[in-house]
Image (tube, coloured by chain):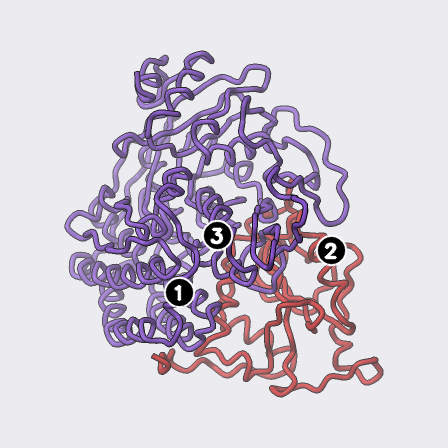
Amino acid sequence: MNAASHIWAGEETETPWRFRLQEMAWRDLVDALKHDDLPFVGLWCDGTDVHALFLPDGQPLAATLALEDGRYPALSPARDISCLYERRIYDLYGAEGMWATDVRPLLDHDVWSSSTPLAEHPGAGGGQKGLIHFQPAEHMPQEGDMADGWGPATGGMEPPLHVALAMQEGRIRAAETVTGYAHRGMELRWRNSRVEDACKLSARVAAGQSVAHQVAFCLAVEDACKEQVGPEIRLLRVALLELERICHHLFLLADMARLAGARLVASGCMGLREKLLQEAAPITGSRLLMDVCVPGGLSLRHATQMGDMCGRLCEVAERDYPALLALWQEYPGLSMQLAGIGKVTADLLERVGLDGPTARAAGWDCDGRRMMPGYEGIWRFTSGRQDGTAEDRAMLLLEEVGESLRMLDEVASRIGLTAGGSVQLSMQDSEGTGMVEGPWGGILYWVRLKEGRVEQVFARNPSSAALLTFEAILPGHQPDDVALLARSLDINAAALDQ
Amino acid sequence: MGLIRAVFDAAFKQDMRRMKPVGPRWPLLLFHVDTGGCGGCGMELQALRYAPYDMEGAGFGFVTSPRNADVLLITGALTRAMAPVLEAAWQAMPTPKGLIAVGSCALDGGMFPENYTVLGGLERRVSIDLKIPGCPPAPQDVLNGLCSLFGKQAVPPKEAETSAV
């Protein structure tokens, strides 16, 4: 009996793809997952139940278990990535994952005004004053180690994150991250909010991936309402997603080049990005593409000019992109420096379940656009990278910029002068999911609607798996490489902490 | 956080311990701390470092240690975990020093008002020398705001050039 069969054998719920399991069946599911590659999306809690979501063949399949005395059998013995979700659930709800592989706090470092703030009866706040203390992982302190660290305030522009380093002979022996600095309590803010407000919150989970979060949220709401938007809206959303991907990749490439000492290359990346933004922002209404989507439609300043805008973006990039590509490839020492660091192996990717450009640069064939509505006849597989180093990731990003520009060119003629229109949604008490291939991998939203409002949201993004990957590849590197490696894996504390 | 008291004007007053000339040869050095936001303001600050925005020509630069900074530049909604980090950065800075809040979150929490983990911006907690609102403010808005400290206007951006390429 495989893992999916254990879920299908559960009790049916009002949601066709979610099944309620008893505790023994849940334990059997965990055992089955140890020998089954069923794609795991995430684990979340609503105070009464825990829910585990999987994606067999790209379709949602969820298992639900009622908490018993505030406890549930953890999934982390079968899926490493689940330990981050279990630690999060404990911090927010106080629900304990039995046999979890890691039970240290993830978000709550005794500085909140209340502990387990989302539980029915939140506890008293922690008494920690001053800088937070954290409990090191078992492998961290060893005799002969020198302690070092990076963040949370580096003077850089990234959201706050601390990386504790155990050093030996000038190199990193072991590393662990300390998160929670950027936790804003999104779950609580989403709870009982209007869908329009919830969408605006989604736009601000992580800048640079804003459109992907908005579209995934909107798809989830539309799925819950059993509605689908028309082909024009889909195409306009594709245009926004690809524009965001181009800008995200150029931003990341610029930062990688700057940290690798290639300031000229960084200027080239940011210069092209700025040109594109100056064309796009007057039409979309936001440089970082925030608040451009609403459930059932779009919220653009000049929607009818989107087709023209896509054409102009391609004209702008046609002049500069080939030269940028050549500069990156020919810049003395840049490729060699990046090729020597940050190698991500297939074993590691499989263990943590990371998708997106990191996996594609290591030879994996994974791109959610293959199945996304709106991409039919537009998307095509392009990756030829295999080695998984920082250089492979950089070259893949550059290739994807070119590919996204080609897609914008195709979309431009199809969009024409359409404004997309909108679909009137009739809110009903139900659940829905929506998935988008964001700039750094799959972003999935699960939304439960109740009485015309959003009752609960679960948002999966690649940052959790990227964090485990980051911790795993740091050993053996020099401490000076930490910032560059973090950028090459797009470690984003804002998305991670939420 | 209640201890923070920004005294930015001190940088240019006659009777202070450290006099600092104003101008491109003596840039005002900024130490950025994201105190817990979506990262959008940080992205726009990063854009400010490159063409077509002439931040350094206008007399500003970013540093990687608060010990070298004249001004603490804050973005994000100020989480309870980041408040002591902010305090430590402030204490590490030499006097005279100032505080600039960039973005709606840093000012009043913006989309992230006070809750169990967020204090909800600096506005009601400390004295802020310069407020630059927006969600997020565009790089040119940030540069205009910074230049207003010197009572001058920022040079409008030229057409974005990738002459380096």
Which label sits on residue B125? 2
* Amino acid on which the number 1 mark rests in the picture: Leu
**Nearest-to-viewer mark from 2 and 3:** 3
Image position, residue A189 (x, y; %) = 54, 39
Residue on which the image places disc 3: A491
A33 vs A112, left or right, is: left
Please say if the residues under marks 2 and 3 sit with CB atoms less than 8 Å apart: no
**Up-down: is A2 above or below B95?**
above
Q: Report how far apart the C-alphas of labels 2 and 3 lie in the structure.
A: 31 Å
Residue type for callout 2: Arg
Give the secondary structure at mark 3: loop
Q: Chain of mark 1?
A: A
Can you identify the residue that label 1 sits on?
A: A253
Q: Which hue is chain A drawn in?
A: purple
Asked whether, in this view, residue A352 is left or right of residue B11, the answer is left
Q: Pick the residue in front: B158 or A351.
A: A351
In the visual, does A332 lie left or right of A107?
left
The number of numbered discs placed on residues in the rendered structure image is 3
Of the chain colours in the picture, the one used for chain B is: red
Judge from the rendering whether residue A178 lies leftward or rightward of residue A321; answer left or right.
Answer: right
Q: Label 2's element? A: loop
Q: CA distance from mark 1 to mark 2?
A: 38 Å
Which is nearer the eye, A239 or A143?
A: A143
Q: Is residue B160 above or below residue A208?
A: below
Q: Disc 1 or 3, which lies upstream in sequence? A: 1
Q: Residue A261 has which mark?
A: none
Q: Foreground: A350 or A29?
A: A350
Give the chain of mark 3: A
Residues under numbered marks 1 and 3 in contact, where contact means CB atoms less than 8 Å apart: no
